[in-house]
Amino acid sequence: MNHVDTMANPTSSSDVATPAETEKLIADVEAYCEEIRPIEEICYLEHQPNPAIGELALKYDLLGMPIPKRYGGRGIDSLTYAKMLARINQEGTGVRTFFSGHTSIGQYPILKYGTEEQKDRYLPASCRGECTLAFGLTEPDAGSNPLEGTCTWRREGDKIIMNGVKYLISNGSVADAVIVFAFAEGDEGPNRRMSAFIVDTAGDTFEAEALHAKPGMYTSDTAMFEMTDHPISGDNMLGAEGNGFRIAMHTLVSGRLSVASGCLGTIEDCLIECLRYAKEREQHGKPIGKHQLVQQHIARIEMMRATADAMIERAALAKEKSDAAPGDKTELANADYVVAQAKYWASNAAWEAVDRAVQVFGGRGWSELYRPFRHLQDVRVCRIYEGTDEIMQLKIASSLLGKEYAAFG
Ligand SMILES: Cc1cc2nc3c(=O)[nH]c(=O)nc-3n(C[C@H](O)[C@H](O)[C@H](O)COP(=O)(O)OP(=O)(O)OC[C@H]3O[C@@H](n4cnc5c(N)ncnc54)[C@H](O)[C@@H]3O)c2cc1C
C-alpha cells in the first residue's frame, strides 16, 4: 500500500483543466447558482433541507471541481476553486458548506493521503454523485483540541471496528462515507496517536442524527453520529497508522480556505443587495444611497470585500504551491499560515459586512425575507468552524513568535 503523499498533485496535463474547460466550469457554476436561488429561497424560509444543493451539483458536474480529471473531477486550480466557492456562497453559506464538507475536507484528504485503490474506489464515485463525503473530527468533548477525542478503532479479522460519537459534522447525516479520526482501542496517555479512516456509513451500527437547533444554515446538513462496533473494510485506514493528526491539520488548510472563500461570497452578495436597495429605497426625499452615512456602510462593505479577496488570492496561491510540492514542509507551513490569516480576516470581514448590510436595509434588514439577514444568521459560524477565531490568532501569533511560544503544544 502506498501511503506517501502520492497525491494529488494534478501536474499531469491530462489532469488539469484547460483554459476552455475552466471557462466552462465557471459558466456551470453560474448556471448552478441561478437555478438554485429560487429553490434555496423557499427551503430557507421553510427551514427545510434543500436536496437540490447536491442534485444540481451533479447536474452541472460540480461534485469534484478541483479533483484531477483522471478521478472524474474537473481539475481546476485552487484559486479558481476559491472563486467558485465565493460565487456559490452568494447563494448561502449552507449551500457552500455542502461543497466544503464534500470536496474541501472530504475528497481532499483521500486525494492527498489515499492509496491508489482508495482513490479509485471513492473519488470517481464521489464525483458522480454516488458517494457524498464528510469530515468527522469534532466530538462532544473535543473541538479545538481534537487530541482529546475518545473515538476508537481496533482490528478484527479483515475488518476495522469503529466506536464513538462525532458531533457537529457538515453533511454528517447525508454522507455515504466520512473521514473519521480515532485512537487505537486501549491506547492511553499523552503519547497516543490518532489515525484516520474512510468510514462507510451504511448499516445500523452507524447512527446519524441531523441537528436542527441552529440559527441559520437551515438548508444544509449538520449532524452527529454514533458508531457502535461499526465494521469497515480493513483497507480503509487513510494514510499511515498514527498519522491522523497530521492528516486532519493538513485537511483543515483546505477547509479553512473554503470557509474564507465562502465568506467573500457573503460579502459580495451583501454589496450587490445594498447597492440595489440604496438606489431603490427613498427616505427624506431621496434614495438612501445619497445619505452619506449609508454611503459609509457601503464603503466599509466594499473594503471588507476587497481585503478579503486579496487575502484569499494570496492564500489560494500558497495552497496551490504547497499542493504542487508534496512533502515540502516549508510550503505547507506557509500555506497553513496564510490560509489561517485569510480565514480569520474573511470571516470577521463578513461579519462586519452582514451587520452593515442589515443596517442599510433598516427594518427589512431584520427579517429572513431579505438576503442580508439570512447571511447574518449563516455567516457567524464561519468564525467558529474549521478552527475558531481564537485558534486562528494563536496560530498567527505563534508563527511569528516561534514554535516555543505556541500556547498549546
Ligand atoms: C455548523 C457547524 C458545522 C461544523 N462542521 C464540522 C465538520 O464538518 N467536521 C468537524 O469535524 N467539525 C465541524 N464543526 C465543529 C467545529 O469545527 C467546532 O465547533 C470548532 O472547532 C470549535 O470546537 P468546539 O465547538 O468544541 O469549541 P471549544 O473547542 O470548546 O471552544 C470553546 C471556546 O474556547 C476557545 N478555546 C478553546 N481552546 C482555546 C485555546 N487553547 N486558547 C484560546 N481559546 C480557546 C474557543 O476558541 C472557543 O471560543 C462544525 C461546527 C458547526 C457549528
Image (cartoon, grey):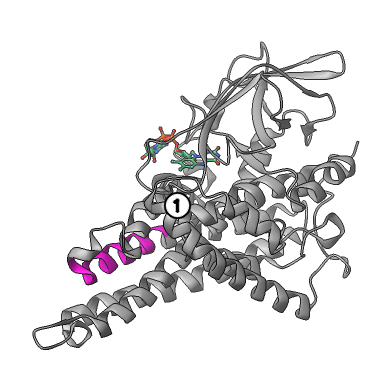
Q: In which quarter of the image is residue 257?
A: bottom right
Is 2 situated left or right of 223 in this image? Answer: right
Q: In the displayed structure, would residue 246 be above or below residue 33? A: above
Measured as percent of width and height from the top left, residue 137 is found at: 58, 34
Measured as percent of width and height from the top left, residue 28 is found at: 66, 71
Q: In the displayed structure, would residue 6 be above or below residue 18? A: above
Residue at 66% over, 18% down: 205
Could you tell me how many numbered marks the image carries?
A: 1
Residue at 69% over, 29% down: 201
Is 361 situated left or right of 228 in this image? Answer: left
Residue at 67% over, 36% down: 178
Query: What residue range appears in magenta?
Result: 347-362
Residue at numbered disc 1: 43
Measured as percent of width and height from the top left, residue 221 is found at: 52, 42
Ligand 1 neighbours mark 1 (CB distance < 8 Å) = no
The answer to whether residue 356 is magenta is yes
The residue nearer to you, when weighing 33 against 139, is 33
Three-letter code, disc 1: Cys
Is 79 situated left or right of 33 in this image? Answer: right
Magenta stretch prevailing secondary structure: helix
The answer to whether residue 384 is magenta is no
